[in-house]
Image (cartoon, rainbow, N blue to C red):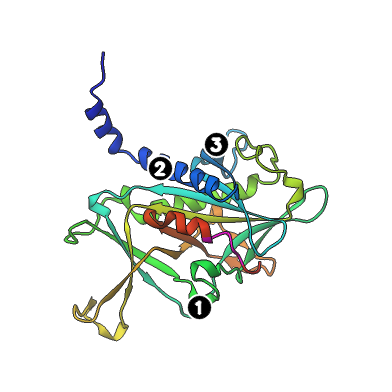
Amino acid sequence: MALDKQKITERFNETGFPFQHWCLETIRNIDKDHGGWIHVAVPEHPFTFPQSEGPTLGIHGAIDIVAVRGVKGIEKSLLFLVIECKRANNEIKNWIFISDKHERKPAFIFSRITNESLVEKIEVSREMAFPELGYSYPGDFDYCYQGIEVNETQTTINRNQEERIYKSLRQVNHGACALEHQIPKNLYIEGLDRAFNFTKWQNFIYIPVIVTTANLFIANFDYKNIKDGDILSEVGDYQEKKWLTYEFPLPDFISYETPERLHLEKRTTFIVNHASLVGFLEKVGTIDSI
């Protein structure tokens, strides 16, 4: 039976697979243009975390894309971008966030190799900066913590739980946590072992990233202009962003504790509009301080 190409293409376009493929090939083509600074980019990297124990099955998933590159500014460091691709249909075309910068610092996870036996120590950095992305100091980060999805015509919000921003954030942070516990304990992970020698690196930095076709905005308004729970329409302001940072509240099974025994409740996650993916990838590898 011959396939109707137009109908099959339409069915494909109802899924997120073409967008994921576009993201993957865009990353690989950037690599060619920049002399190989992205060491490897692999799709559908599987994980189970927490791992299965006896009859108790762990939580299984797959990371849409893992991209690995060197770091400018920190010697012997590799950056792992754990990427979730989210194609936004017309019902969730605009993502609008609220931010809270009050006495906040970002939270990034990295692991350090402490000796020749490749003993790994997972740590939390509150001082990591990405100057080329516009985040040179803690006060520069966006610290988004709530968001809504609005349709293309800006007339309704999304009420479909399967399409919520939170679901993509949970998936990408779950995958990042799993990868951190895989590396470098399992040095020869298929797809990630072919491009570099783990023994030459000292620091592995893991950054969760959502790439989406949704337009990104941050709402800016003074709480004094909220009356009876509503923002006064004449005072709301919405800043469009190429990318932003979101503080994801961590479920207990992927939470962290710092060496000072401070329980880490939230993890900084990048959300990137697909039209700015190339620019983001060009700049995210410049990192100041761990």
Above or below 275: residue 234:
below
Q: Main secondary structure of the magenta part?
A: loop
Q: CA distance from mark 1 to mark 2?
A: 33 Å
Of circles 1 and 2, which is in front?
2
How many dots with numbers? Answer: 3
280 to the left or right of 189: left
Q: Quadrant of the C terminus?
A: bottom right
Q: Earlier in the sequence, mark 1 or mark 2?
A: 2
Badge 1 local density, few (<14 within 10 Å), some, or many (20+)? Answer: some
Badge 3 local density, few (<14 within 10 Å), some, or many (20+)? Answer: few
Give the percent coordinates (x, y) of residue 201: 73, 52
Q: Earlier in the sequence, mark 1 or mark 3?
A: 3
Q: Which residue is mark 2?
A: 22
Residue farthest along the bottom direction in this orientation: 224
Check disc 2 and report its element: helix, strand or loop.
Answer: helix
Give the percent coordinates (x, y) of residue 175: 52, 47
Check disc 1 and report its element: helix, strand or loop.
Answer: helix
Label disc, if present, on residue 289 of the rendered structure: none
Magenta stretch bounds:
283-287
Of circles 1 and 3, which is in front?
1
Q: CA distance from mark 1 to mark 3?
A: 42 Å
Label disc, if present, on residue 57 of the rendered structure: 3
Q: CA distance from mark 3 to mark 2?
A: 33 Å
